[in-house]
Amino acid sequence: MAHNVFCARYKQEMEGLDEPPFDSDFGHKIYNNVSKRAWGEWIEHQKMLLNEYRLQPWTPQAQEFLVEQMNQYFFGEGAQLPKEYVPPSPR
């Protein structure tokens, strides 16, 4: 059975994730408030952050930074792009 949520990013009822992305209170907050579509978009945004900032995701500092960015992306004013970021040109 589909899990529907009122998506914090899109401000509408949408299909939710199949399970919490991680086992914590924040993971459950995402599960209950973020759609599959918004989560997929976050994954792409996170890849850009990892590349632009050359983060090593196994380090506590990178994990803390990504959680802060994720919180802003879904529940704040949106995550900011790195100052030097240049989006890829369309193909």
Image (tube, rainbow, N blue to C red):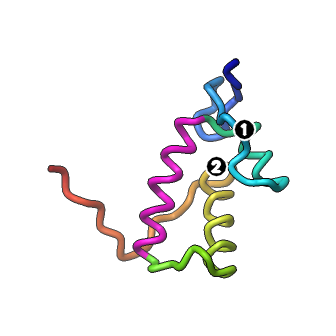
Q: Which residue is mark 1?
A: 33
Mark linked to residue 59 = none
Instruction: Characterize the magenta stretch by its predominant secondary structure.
Output: helix
Which residue was labeled with disc 2? Answer: 74
- Mark closest to the chain's N terminus, 2 or 1: 1
Mark 2 touches mark 1? (CB < 8 Å): yes
Estimate the x, y position of residue 10 in percent, counting from the top left: 58, 34
Q: Which residues are magenta?
A: 36-52
Identify the residue at horizontal 35%, vertical 70% (top origin). 85
Quadrant location of the N terminus in the rendered image: top right
For label 1, the SS is helix
The residue depicted at 60 percent of the width and 40 percent of the height is 9
Q: Check the image and report above or below for 83 versus 20.
A: below
Furthest residue to the right?
Answer: 25
At horizontal 45% and vertical 80% (from top left) the residue drawn is: 54
Q: Secondary structure at mark 2?
A: helix
Mark 1: few/some/many CA within 10 Å (<14, 14-19, 20+): many
Going by the picture, which residue comes out furthest to the left?
91
| Residue 60 quadrant | bottom right
Q: Amino acid at mark 1?
A: Asn
Residue occupying the point 60% across, 54% down: 73
Could you tell me the amino acid type at mark 2?
Phe
Q: Is residue 2 left or right of residue 90?
A: right
Would you call the spot at circle 2 few (<14 residues within 10 Å), some (14-19), or many (20 or more)?
Answer: many
**Relative to residue 85, is residue 88 depicted above or below?**
above
Magenta highlight on residue 28: no
Tell me: 86 left or right of 40. Answer: left
Q: CA distance from mark 2 to mark 1?
A: 9 Å
